[in-house]
Image: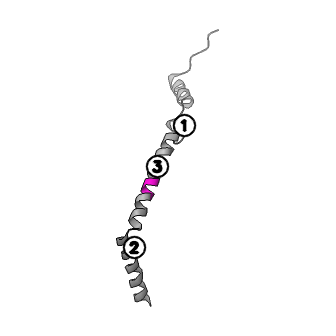
């Protein structure tokens, strides 16, 4: 006895359920992406360190704090 075929709409629905979604296929960053992200974060931190420890920025921040203390006190 032959098995009756399912309607095409049901077959499409079943195929969609069985197929992994795009989100399921991409479950996070790979090791290479983590490495690039880590190197980028370290480079950004190094640039910020150089900028914030420069004499100009230190003098500006000191002046801001001194002015704030003078106005408040």
Q: Position of residue 51 (x, y in %)?
A: 38, 64
Secondary element under disc 2, as helix, strand or loop, is helix
- Residue at (41, 67) in percent of width and height: 52
Q: Which of marks 3 and 1 is in front?
A: 3
Q: Chief secondary structure of the magenta span?
A: helix
The quarter of the image holding the C terminus is bottom left
Q: Position of residue 42 (x, y in %)?
A: 46, 54
Residues rendered magenta in the picture? 41-45
Q: Where is residue 6 in the image (x, y as percent from the top left)?
A: 56, 20
Q: Which of marks 2 and 1 is in front?
A: 2
Which of the two discs, 2 and 1, labels the residue nearer the N terminus? Answer: 1
- Which dot marks residue 39? 3
**Residue 44 located within the stretch drawn in magenta:** yes
User: Does residue 22 lie above or below 9 as drawn?
Assistant: below
Q: Name the residue under label 2.
A: 58
**Residue 61 located within the stretch drawn in magenta:** no
- Which dot marks residue 41? none
Q: Do the residues labelled 3 and 1 touch (CB within 8 Å)?
A: no
User: Does residue 46 lie above or below 23 as drawn?
Assistant: below
């Amino acid at each position: 006895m032959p098995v009756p075929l399912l309607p095409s709409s049901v077959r499409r629905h079943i195929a969609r359920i069985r197929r992994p979604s795009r989100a399921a296929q991409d479950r996070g960053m790979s090791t290479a992406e983590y490495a690039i992200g880590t190197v980028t974060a370290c480079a950004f931190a190094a640039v910020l360190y150089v900028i914030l420890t420069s004499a100009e920025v230190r003098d500006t921040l000191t002046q801001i704090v001194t002015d704030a203390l003078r106005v408040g006190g």
